[in-house]
Image (tube, grey):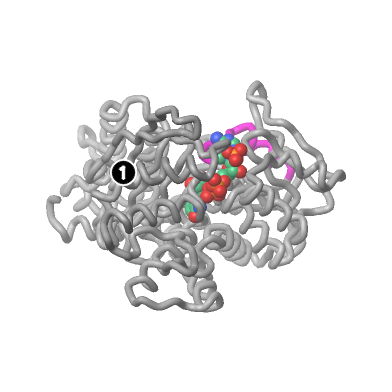
Amino acid sequence: MSSGVVPPLGVRTSDDYLEEVLLTVKAKNPAEPEFHQAVQEVFDSLRLVLAKRPEYRAAKILERIVEPERVLMFRVPWFDDQGQMQINRGFRIEMNSAIGPYKGGLRFHPSVNLGILKFLAFEQVFKNSLTTLPMGGGKGGSDFDPKGKSDNEVMRFCQSFMTELSRHIGPDTDVPAGDIGVGGREIGFLFGQYKRLRNEFTGVLTGKGLNWGGSLIRPEATGYGCVYFASEMLKSRRDSLEGKLCLVSGSGNVSQFTIEKLLELGAKPIALSDSNGVIVDPDGINRDKLAWVMQLKNFRRGRIQEYTNQFPKALFMAADPKLDHNPLWNVKADCAFPSATQNEINAKDAANLIKNGVKLVAEGANMPCTLPATKLFLDAGILYGPAKAANAGGVATSGLEMAQNSMRMSWTREEVDERLHKIMIAVHRNCYETAAEYGTPGNLVNGANIGGFLKVADAMLDQGLV
Ligand code: NDP
């Protein structure tokens, strides 16, 4: 994509400038392909902005926005149940605090490394800006794998992780939440240790339990919000979710509540997955089946394959790393909700979805589509809701949890859900209108990137060189 402005001979274009900054990012952050990908996606949209707003270039906003304000990396030692010492690596990326305290989840997964967390923190800056709430961007986590660990092991790990992290966070500084591998159990152990170390009961984490400062609807928020966003996208084409066949990947927090809200709005979810494979249920995953999946995943911590033992009409397709595509995305459906992890839809998967007539892709996970896959969706003109907009409901409701903690009161379920719904409508409207204003109507990738960027960039201009 180009800015469309033809410069006089010999004058560097903003395209050159963006390319230069991107090359510097790649040179200074080698072996971080996910971070490069996230920066490139945002920069592709910003070509449209720099032509109109040269002051950003003069103030080196791009060079600053790609540089984390602070990166913390630390050792996390703990004892397993056999009394053996285990050593993991902990991280917190404090990316940008121009519009509020750092805010973003913690991920515990063996694939976690600095580059993945930097991509997530970078995305978070723009996403948080889109929510309309005052939150900066951050992300953190560890290469610790909670799978197969006992509750006591998870607790000892969380306590050791928080022993270091507690020095760097606080309700007005940096407020972590959950992400992959960090749910209610982990947030409980982390909060308990923070409180013990600091002798303070404060809203330093979100996603807390209801009787110790949590907000109603926070567990549901990312999935519900993604479906609200999808519904707004369909409305823009005078369509709705009623009767739509839907594919949902993953089977964790985001996937479960995506399915719950899809059912409420009359859609028919037919697929779920985990890292071992995919289940497809042609009869649909109804409320009872979803309740069974929640028990399986949140309490028994089992594998999605077990679904086919319980519901024999469903098919299981094992994950096969030798395949160049994921069979989940080759199932005929109207809507796709990738809700597992980054880069889970490649160009082949995108082509399969388009070939099968998909009308809408709404990203529950962060950056689930590769850049070529995104391009295919945009070129095909289907409704495509990028993660930083479509899954912003989670962090938005974390923002509502922070507000309730500051006021020392709790809103009802209906009140929080209504606020979440209004926020998702506003996020969609912002992306939709910004895309049109910058000459690419319907391109919500540009709308989200530009809409999220402008607020942060203007705050950075106001605050001087910091
Ligand atoms: P959970 O840990 O609850 O669930 C993650 C799901 O994705 C599991 O089913 C897991 O399967 C699957 N998964 C994870 N990694 C991989 C992988 N490498 N390959 C295949 N499957 C994988 O996490 P969440 O539901 O919280 O998060 C899912 C996505 O949503 C992430 O991208 C996260 O960043 C994003 N997100 C989450 C928010 C939240 O509020 N929780 C907010 C905004 C975005 P398995 O158990 O086999 O690993």
Q: In this picture, is 282 found above or below 227?
A: above
Q: Is residue 329 above or below residue 195?
A: above
Q: Observer-nearest residue: 90 or 324?
A: 90
Asked which quadrant contains residue 53, the reply is bottom left
Q: Is residue 69 left or right of residue 447?
A: left
Q: Amino acid at mark 1?
A: Ile
Q: Position of residue 440 (x, y in %)?
A: 46, 53
The outermost residue toward the top is: 322
Secondary structure of the residue carrying tag 1 is strand
- In the image, residue 381 sits, relative to residue 403, either above or below, namely above
- View extreme (front): residue: 83
Is residue 55 shown left or right of residue 261?
A: left
Q: Is residue 380 magenta?
A: no
| Quarter location, residue 225 | bottom right
> Which of these two is toward me, 205 or 225?
205
Q: Whole-percent x and y of residue 308?
A: 80, 42
Task: Give the residue number, with chain letter if any, for mark 1.
Answer: 93
Q: Residue at x 46, y 65 (%)?
A: 397
Residue sitting at 62 percent across and 66 percent down?
Answer: 235
Q: Does residue 192 appear in this view?
A: yes
Residue 353 image point, x, y percent: 68, 41
Identify the residue shown where x is 39% and y is 73%.
404
Q: Decide which of 16, 144 is in the foreground and name it.
A: 144
Is residue 378 something one can see in this rendering?
A: no
> Quadrant location of the N terminus?
top left
Where in the image, quadrant-wise, is ligand 1 located?
A: top right
**Residue pictured at 59% horizontal, 33% vertical:** 347
Q: Residues within 10 Å of mark 1 (few under 14, many from 20)?
A: many
What residue range appears in magenta?
A: 341-356
Q: Nearer the viewer, residue 103 or 45?
A: 103
Image position, residue 114 (x, y; %): 35, 34
